[in-house]
Image: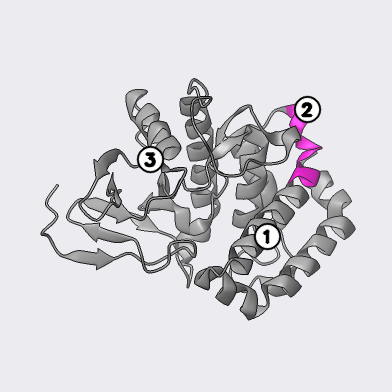
Amino acid sequence: MRDEEAEILLVGGTANRGQVVRVGDTVRRPQRPTSPATHALLRHLADVGFTGAPRFLGIDKLDREVLSYMPGTAVTPPFPEWALTDEALASVAALLRAYHRAVETFDSSPYVWPPSPPDAFSGELISHNDVNLDNVVFRGDHAVALIDFDLASPGSRIWDVAGAARLWAPLRPEHYIDDVRRARVLARFRLFVDGYGLAREDRQRLVEVIRQNHNWSYDLMGSAAANGHAGFSDYYASGALDRAAQTHQWYLDNGHVLRSALV
């Protein structure tokens, strides 16, 4: 590690906005009270040969965590069309499945984690919990790595599938979709679930998990905003609460349609 190299600000994300930089072939990020757990997770992924996550390299002189830089492109607004293709979507599903296989042997019990999903969806494995578009690195049109494990905690496969499908399909009212995914959300939803290979017994309960995942995510962001987090405060000021309420109702009104898409 060479701390004297120039720092390049990395854009994308809200929680650590303006605080994540690239230094050479490393990334420097603020630490959190639960960082030791995240570092142990990343060490495990390296030990089992999973290449789709950064390596934890240590702590720098500014007390920031040092991670390996993952070459490629994260999907940030305005979303490029190559990132919204069916091929890109299928590769995200495959990457998430590979992560779950890599993490299933990790012993999470010695560590303190961020808030976990609801009890019904917690404890199976360490879920990423934030497979948003800007937390997936692509090379070409293929997803190769997950980044930003800050929210990772004891969760489950179905919880991660719900969150990822919700964001990538995306599952929300169509007037909130202004790109090539509009009018294709049901097909993309089915493609993601098929691509992941979700167990048959989980497919019909997935829609309810998606609704709970949506509410859980907005509760986390709301708590952060209430505690003065500038990025989430700005997000809420942009009308997030109204969008969240409309999307919640959309799930209630269209649950049967979403379930039918998976049959």
Question: Does the magenta run of residues contain 148?
Answer: no
Q: Residue at x 23, y 50 (%)?
A: 26
Label 2 sits on what residue type?
A: Glu
Q: How many C-alpha atoms fall within 10 Å of the one at disc 2: few (<14), some, or many (≥20)?
A: few
193 left or right, relative to 13 = right
Segment tinted magenta in the rendering: 200-209
Q: Quadrant of the C terminus?
A: top right
Question: In this orientation, which residue lies closer to the viewer: 159 or 237?
Answer: 237
Relative to 195, residue 131 above or below: below
- Which residue carries the number 2 mark? 201
Q: Nearer the viewer, mark 2 or mark 1?
A: 1
Task: Name the mark on residue 74.
Answer: none
Q: Nearer the viewer, mark 1 or mark 3?
A: 1
Quote the CA–CA distance across marks 1 and 3: 25 Å
Secondary structure mostly seen in the magenta stretch: helix
Which sits earlier in the primary sequence, circle 2 or circle 1? 2
Farthest bottom residue?
A: 238
Q: Position of residue 255 (x, y in %)?
A: 85, 51
Label 1 sits on what residue type?
A: Tyr
Relative to 219, residue 117 above or below: above
Quote the CA–CA distance across marks 2 and 3: 29 Å
Which sits earlier in the primary sequence, circle 2 or circle 3? 3
Question: In this orientation, which residue lies closer to the viewer: 112 or 136?
Answer: 112
Task: Name the mark on residue 53.
Answer: 3
Question: In this orientation, which residue lies closer to the viewer: 51 or 155?
Answer: 155
Is there CB contact under 8 Å for labels 2 and 1?
no
- Which residue carries the number 1 mark? 218
